[in-house]
Structure formats: structure tokens, C-alpha cells
Image (cartoon, helix red, strand yellow):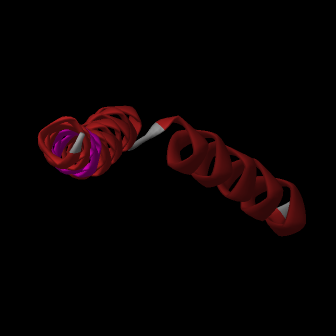
């Protein structure tokens, strides 16, 4: 009989433990999403700055070619 009671207590404890922390998991997922979005935005900003710098270089080179002719 003691074994049955222990088994029921163990099952109840496992079922309660598996149902908890849903809010903490959701908050962690939200924080991870924000962190990833910030990283992507930073990479895109660097890429845009590099593209703009490359475009400025092309304009300067084209102006020098026009002046040389």
C-alpha cells in the first residue's frame, strides 16, 4: 500500500512539475527574438553603410574619369 501511495505522489509531482514555467519560457523566447532582431538590424545597418561607401567610391572614380577625358 505504501508503494502505491508513493507512486501516486510521484506521478502527481511529475505532472505538476511538467506544467510549470510556461510564462518563463514565453519571456525567454521573447527576449531571444528581440536579441536576434537587434543582431539582424545591426548587420543590415553595417551592410547598408558599406554599400553607401562603395557607391560613394564609384561616384568619385567616375568623376575622375570624366575630368581626365
Foreground residue among 36 and 27: 36
Query: 5 left or right of 21?
Result: right
Residue placed at 81% from the left, 57% from the top?
A: 7
Total number of numbered discs in the rendering: 0
Q: Which picture quadrant has residue 59?
A: top left
Decide whether residue 52 is among the magenta residues: yes
**Residue 12: percent from left, percent from top:** 63, 44
Foreground residue among 51 and 22: 51
Query: 37 left or right of 4?
Result: left
**Residue 19: percent from left, percent from top:** 52, 35
Decide whether residue 42 is among the magenta residues: no
Residue placed at 33% from the left, 42% from the top?
A: 40
Residue placed at 37% from the left, 39% from the top?
A: 29
Residues rendered magenta in the picture: 48-58
**Residue 18: percent from left, percent from top:** 59, 44
Foreground residue among 30 and 13: 30
Residue placed at 52% from the left, 42% from the top?
A: 16
Q: Which quarter of the image is occupied by the C terminus? A: top left
Q: Main secondary structure of the magenta part?
A: helix
Foreground residue among 29 and 60: 60
Query: 11 left or right of 39?
Result: right
Q: Which quarter of the image is occupied by the N terminus? A: bottom right
Amino acid at each position: 500500500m505504501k508503494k502505491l501511495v508513493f507512486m501516486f505522489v510521484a506521478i502527481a509531482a511529475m505532472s505538476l512539475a511538467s506544467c510549470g514555467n510556461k510564462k518563463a519560457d514565453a519571456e525567454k523566447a521573447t527576449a531571444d527574438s528581440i536579441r536576434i532582431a537587434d543582431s539582424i538590424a545591426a548587420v543590415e545597418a553595417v551592410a547598408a553603410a558599406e554599400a553607401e561607401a562603395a557607391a560613394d567610391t564609384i561616384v568619385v572614380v567616375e568623376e575622375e574619369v570624366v575630368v581626365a577625358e
